[in-house]
Amino acid sequence: MKIAWIGTGIMGAAMCGRLLEAGHECVVFNRTESKARVLLEKGARWASSPAAAGEDAEAIFTMVGFPHDLEETIFHPERGVLAGQKDAPHRAKFLVDMTTSRPALARRIAEAAAILGIQALDAPVSGGDVGAKNGSLSIMVGGETDAFEALAPLWNVLGKTIVHQGPSGAGQHAKMVNQILIAGNMMGVCEALRYALAAGLEPEKVLESVSTGAAGSWSLSNLGPRILRHDFEPGFKIRHFLKDLRIALEEAEAFGSGAGLYLPGTQKARELYDLLERNGLGEKGTQALFLWEDQKKI
């Protein structure tokens, strides 16, 4: 399949790389061209803009940082994906956004794409840099069922658990559930490891005991060892996770009438991560929450 891939950060580059290795033809765009170099060396072609990337594509994928980045990527009147599709000799069939973004924006993109005869899906992922590299991501998809099913060969290259959550925006809501769970879990992982160290235990042995029991989790197994090695480089950056937590809290506040849904654990996680970002750690991985009391270990 001819694919346009827009956004070649930590996750996007690994995912597009898997599509290239599977034999798909990929045209890529990223605001910083150097971040796409590995993909270009693997055979991807460079495009000068999101509009140009999608000119001859059957499926256009976007995976950028923030909702405002996504809006510009899709809706810019000259360089945006939809601007390019208006004049494309053969319009894309599918537009797949894998950014974690706002459900309302996913619906807006789907409505605008439909006017051009393009089926749009929101398909955020979970699994971090490890999952992106080995194709074991969990992919949460919102959009039309027939479009979801048509893209099965691509989903299967990128992920291990692929679930159609419902109409446009449903994938983003499911991702908010995922991020709420991670927020609470990361606080537990960091507090537990601090406790183990304060008690004089050998933390590697503690991890061996607890990671396969009822307390086990992806974060504990994958990020716990990084914490013990003082490896706080990002598989997923704090500044991006903060964006997700803010979206989750805003969506929760908007539910129903009155005060909305109160999420005290997520509120606390946002406060702690906000503290880290204000102290210059926004580019570190989410496991750097471990440093919230002692930032001298960076």
Image: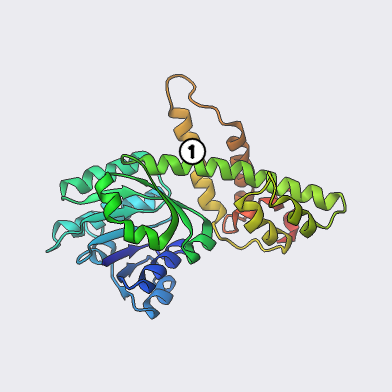
Q: How many marks?
A: 1
Q: Is residue 140 left or right of residue 86?
A: right
Of all residues shown, which one is farthest toward the front? 213
Residue 56 position within the rendered picture, expressed as x and y whole percent measured from the top left:
20, 67
> Image point 28% across, 45% down: which residue?
145
Q: Is residue 244 visible?
A: yes
What residue would you read off at disc 1?
Answer: 248
- Name the spot of residue 270 as percent of width and height, x first: 58, 41
Question: Where does residue 45 sit, x and y in percent of width and height?
Answer: 30, 75
Q: Quadrant of residue 234?
A: bottom right
**Does 33 appear above or below 78?**
below
In this view, the residue in front, 265 or 2, is 2
Q: Quadrant of the N terminus?
A: bottom left
Name the colouring of the figure: rainbow
Residue 42 placement, left or right of 107: right
What amino acid type should be assigned to the residue bearing mark 1?
A: Ala
Under circle 1, the secondary element is helix
